[in-house]
Each structure stands twice: as structure tokens, then as C-alpha cells.
Image: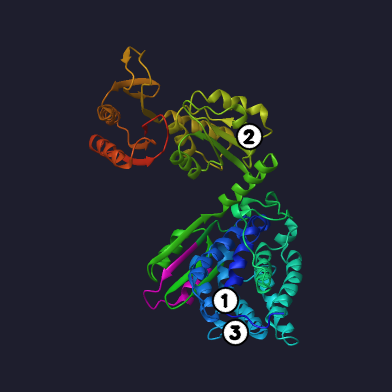
Amino acid sequence: MRQTIDGAAFRRMVISAAAAIEIQKNHINELNVFPVPDGDTGTNMSMTLNNAVADLKQAEDPSLTRAADITASALLRGARGNSGVILSLLFRGIAKELKGVEEATGARFAAALQCGVENAYKAVMKPAEGTILTVARLAAAGAQEAVKENDYVEFALQSAIGAGKIALENTMSQNPVLKKAGVVDAGGVGWISILEAMLSSLRGEDVIAPQGGQETAAREEANFSDFSTGDITFGYCTEFIVSRDNDGDPEALRSWLDSMGDSLVLVEDDEIIKVHVHTNHPGEVIEKALSYGGLVTVKIENMRLQHTEKLLSEAERNNQVAPAEKKYGMVAVCAGDGLSSVFKDLGADQVIKGGQTMNPSTQDIAMAINHTPAETVFVFPNNKNIIMAAEQAQPLTEKQVVVVRSRTIPQGISAMLAFDPEASVEDNLMTMREARHNVSTMQITYAARNSDFDGFAIHKGDYLALYGSALFGTSRDVNSLLKGLAEKIAGEGKEIITIFYGEDIDEKTAEKTLKIFEKLCPDAEISLINGGQPVYYYLISAE
């Protein structure tokens, strides 16, 4: 049985722990229902630990103090999510206790585990029982009790795992959210996996992540459909590291952040302040952080969207209809990553890839409707050739389906902007119909062959400009067509213009197009967006 650990042993233990979490991360994600059911605990823990692995592998023969410091520093800067931050706090406490120690006995290692727990509890504003904190606390207590009998580090770690597993099983009864889901705490599972991997390494059996990130053993899994997206009180997971450029008091920041949300963790050292908080006002949080110094990193995630995506993933995996989490949902059809992002930002639950020359099937649309977690689903075909397929999808689903007969991308965007989640289906449909009729759509594409259209002789390779469904003009010079469209828009007194440029247009060329419209439409508000759409060089919306 191993009596002590040195720097080399500790380095191997942490690397093994990272490999174990990489192997287990999908399983841990599936258990993640607290504090919000967003399914990312395993991923966050894995990414956090892997941040230390690279630094540890570069360190040549580090002392125990050095190995622990490298781990703590890398985890602090690379911590992701609530679980990742807590993990960094645990290892920061371990490093603090191992400062100046060349070899740690069981008693010293048990004390290091306890120091990690104290460090984590101190930083978490409102620690909840039945979490990774509970598991880590009772595991450390088990190790401290064990070393009274045997001072071997291996025995201390083995005892910590035994006590931690008992604590892990009890998390289900301690936390009503876990009890409802019928699972143990995801973060607690991660901490036990870390301790077990460290013990395996200590015994000469280093854990190695398989190629391709394959995961072992099928296990229990939480049902995310048991939870409503509306149950998430504070919607944005906000994380940042800010430099300490002045003498601002971190405790004052901690107190202010506590009033802005929950799941607050604040860690600081002489150079930086690291914060994780769930809030509904991430902009205000970042603005407050800037009063302490410059931002080193920042990450904001919409946890309601994460939960909805998790529900959709479950529905797709199980080939089931997503349960109704809300009154209304939306499905949009478009092509291009930029346009897809626009529709998602406007509230689309599902975006189907499709459009001119690539029409989705009725089954594709029906499946997207089924995967939308809402009672009533509005469908935006955004192409005249897709409207019928969308309407044919109605009898293929049990959900109420309302097809908004948008014939173009701008019509679909305008209609979605007019949506009111508090209004009735009938009132929404009326408002959205009016909105799509109030927007003009222009498109620039090319002629694939010689033809005749509306009296225009079209030659292969010509640029074609469409205004609505009518041909506006053809030319070998795309700028002449753009100027003509801009002049027409200006003459009609349009006030809001949005230019979406396609995958074949680079940013520099798009900026030149923007200048054409700014010059010829000086009174309009003009936006330029990378739509990434195929076929059409430009889609232009004017209202």
C-alpha cells in the first residue's frame, strides 16, 4: 500500500482523473438536473480538468507543491460552468494545503481534501446540500477519520471514496430535484470518478481516455422532460475572469452579484477575479465587472435554450414527440448558417435546412414540429415552393400546427418579429400576416442557362435581380443592379433595410454593397448580416 505521494505521483493522478471524466462525461451530462437541467456538467468538468493536463505534461519532474499549483492555476483559468468552478476551488484548497510539502502522507492528503472543501464552501454564496459539495465534504471527513487509524495516503484515498459513495447515494434524498428525476448528483458522480481515478493511478493503473472519446458502461439517466424550461429562474450562465487593476473589494462584488441571481461562485487571487453566476442581466454583470479591471475571458450561455435543446435531443434520440414545455413554438426553413442563427435568435426552436433548389420533405417538417416542445407550433416555410409541404405536415403530428405562409426569408423574419407570446393563435396569425405583407424582398442571383423571362432575354452567367416575385433586371455588373434596387427603395421611402450576403460574397465586397445603399438611402436604417445562404448573392429586406 502506497504510504506517500510526491509531485510525479500527483501529476499522474490528476491526468488519470481527467481521463476518467472524459470517459464518463456523457453519463454525467445525462444526470445533470441541478441547479438547472441543462445537461453540461460532465462536459464542463472534463474541459476544466483537461486545461490542467496540458500544463502538467509540460512540467518536468515537478515537486508536489509545483504540481498542485500548476493544477490549481490551470483549473481556475479554465473553469467552465458551476461544476468546473467548484472543481477548481477544491483543487485550489488542495494546493494550499500542500504548499511547501515534498511528500504527503495520508494525514496531509486528508487535510488537503478538507482544505479544498472549506475553500469551495467559502466561495459558494448559497451552498446547497445533495451536491458535489456534500459529497466532497463527507469524502474528506471519511479520509480524516481513516488516517487516525492508518496514515498511508492510499488508505486515506480509499476511505474517502467509500464515504463519498455513501454520500453520493444520499444526494437523491437530500435534493428534491434529484429525487424527482430519480438520479444522484451529477457533480458528485464526477468527484467520485476523480477520486477513483487518482486511486487507480496511485496503484500503478493509470486511466487512459480511449481514442474517439468512447464512453464505458450504460447507466441510469435523468429524464429532462420532467423539468420545465420555465422552472429556470435565472436564464443566463455568466462566467468571466477580470484582472484586478485596482483595489476594488471582491467581497463587495460578491455581495452585489448575489442580488443579481443565484449559483454564485467567486474566486480571487492577487491578479484576477473569477466569477460564475446565473442571472437574467448578464450585461449589467459584465459592466460591473469592468469597474474592477479588464476582462480576460467572458462566456454567457442561455440555459433555457440549453434545456430546450436537451429536450429536443432526447426526443430525437427516442424518436418521440417532445413534450409541451410552453404554449407556442416555432419552426423555420432556411439555408445558411447566418440565417439559421437569425431565426434561432428570434425564437425558432427548430431550423430546417432548405430553400431554393433544396426543399425539405413533408416528413422533415413534421419531424421538426414533433421535436418542438410546444402545444402550438408556427411554421415559417420562407419559400413559396415549401408552403404546400408544410401544410401537408399538419395531419402527420398530434400538435396544433399553424403555417405562416411566408414566401421569402425577409417575410419570415418580419413575421417572427411581430409574434406576441401573450396573444392568441388567431391574433398572432393576423399580425404576422400583416407583417409579412409590409416587407419588400429583393434577391440577387445568377442565370444558370439562357432563357426568356417577363420579356427579358436572359443569358447564362447574367446576374438577376428580383423584386418580390418579378424580375427587376439583369446585368453582367452586379453593382448596377444593386444601385437600381437601392434607388427604388429610396423612392418608396423605406425606413429599415437589411442586407443578407451569401456564402459566395466576402466581407469586403459586402461592405462595398452596404456603402451603395447608405449613399442612395441616406434616411434609412441599414444593417448588414452574413447570411451564408447559397444560390442568392444577396437577400435584401426593406420596410
Q: Position of residue 197 (x, y in %)?
A: 66, 68
Q: Amino acid at mark 1?
A: Ala
Rendered-image quadrant of the N terminus: bottom right
Q: Position of residue 123 (x, y in %)?
A: 56, 74
Q: Quadrant of residue 286?
A: bottom left
In the rendered structure, find residue 203 and report the number of the disc placed on it: none
Which of the labelled discs sits on residue 103, or is there none?
A: 3
The residue wearing badge 2 is: 367
What amino acid type should be assigned to the residue bearing mark 2? Met
Pointer 2 and pointer 1: residues touching (CB < 8 Å)?
Answer: no
Residue 112 placement (x, y as % from top left): 61, 81
What amino acid does circle 3 point to? Glu
Helix, strand or loop for disc 1: helix
From the viewer's perspective, is residue 12 above or below residue 412? below
Magenta segment boundaries in residue numbering: 239-260
Q: Is residue 53 left or right of residue 470?
A: right
Residue 249 counted in the magenta span:
yes
The first of marks 1 and 3 along the sequence is 1
